[in-house]
Amino acid sequence: MYAYELKCKTDPQWIKTVMADFDAFLIDHAANERKASTLAMSMVVHYPDKDDIVREMIDLAMEEMAHFREVIKIMLKRGLQQIPDKTNKYIGSFMKHMRKDPKHYLLDRLLMFSIVEKRGAERFGLVGEALTEAKIKDFYQRLAAAEYRHYELFISLAHKYYPHDEVMDRLNELLQVEADIVKSCPFKAAVH
Ligand SMILES: [Fe+2]
Ligand SMILES: [Fe+2]
C-alpha cells in the first residue's frame, strides 16, 4: 500500500464550527457526495481505454451515490432541503493546480482525488468522534472508513499508471498545495 500523510491536520476549530450548525454541515455534505459520484462518472467517460479506471470508477460512483442517499435521508428526517450548489474555495483552488496536458492530467486528478478523500476521511472521523447519537455517529464512522478506502484506491491507481518517482514528486507538491489551501480557508459548517 502506498500510504502517505497529509501535511497539516484539521484545526480543532473546524469541528466546533461544524457542531454549532450541524444542519448546514449535512446540506453541504450531501452535495459533496453527489459531486463525488459525478466526478467518478466523468472519469469513466474520459478514460474508456483504461479498464481499471472504468471498473473502479463505476463502483465508486455507485458508492458515493449511496452515501448521498443516506445523507439525504438524514436531512429529510430533520426537515432539511438541498440548496443550490455554491462554488467551493477548497476544490476550486485545488483545481487551479491541475496540469491540463494529456500526459499529466490523469496523474494530477488521481492525486488530487486521493488527497481530497484522505481529508474527507480525517474530517468524517472527527465528526464521528464529536457526535453522540449512536446511529448517526456510526454512520460517520463508516463514512470515514469508506473515504479512507477511496484515498487508497486513487493513490494505487496513480502508481499503476505512472512511474514511482513521478508520483512521489507530484504527490509532495500537491500535498503542500492542499495544506496551504486548508490553512487559507475560513472555518465553515461544511466538509471543506
Ligand atoms: Fe463518500
Ligand atoms: Fe469518497
Image (cartoon, helix red, strand yellow):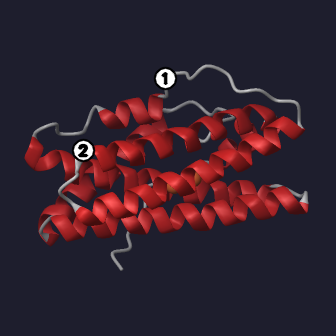
Query: Pointer 2: what residue?
Result: 46
Say few, some or many: other residues with alpha carbon within 10 Å of mark 1 (under 14 / 14 to 19 / 20 or more).
few
Q: Locate residue 77, reporting x and y percent.
A: 88, 40
Horizontal side of residue 191 vs 173, given as left or right: right
Quadrant that contains the C terminus: top right
Q: Locate residue 112, reporting x and y percent.
A: 34, 49
Q: Locate residue 40, reporting x and y percent.
A: 40, 48
Image vertical order of residue 30 relative to residue 119, above or below: above
Say few, some or many: other residues with alpha carbon within 10 Å of mark 2 (under 14 / 14 to 19 / 20 or more).
few
**Residue at 38% over, 63% down:** 56
**Residue at 28% over, 48% down:** 109
Residue 87 marker: 1
User: Which is more toward the observer, 183 or 134?
Assistant: 134
Q: Evaluate whether residue 160 shows in this view.
A: yes
User: Which is more toward the observer, 69 or 35?
Assistant: 69
Question: Does the beta carbon of the residue at mark 1 sit less than 8 Å from ligand 1?
Answer: no
Q: CA distance from mark 2 to mark 1?
A: 23 Å
User: Which is more toward the observer, 33 or 155?
Assistant: 33
The kind of residue on which mark 1 rests is: Thr
The kind of residue on which mark 2 rests is: His
Q: Residue furthest bottom?
A: 1
Horizontal side of residue 52 vs 14, given as left or right: left
Name the element at disc 2.
Answer: helix
**Residue at 49% over, 23% down:** 87
**Residue at 39% over, 67% down:** 153
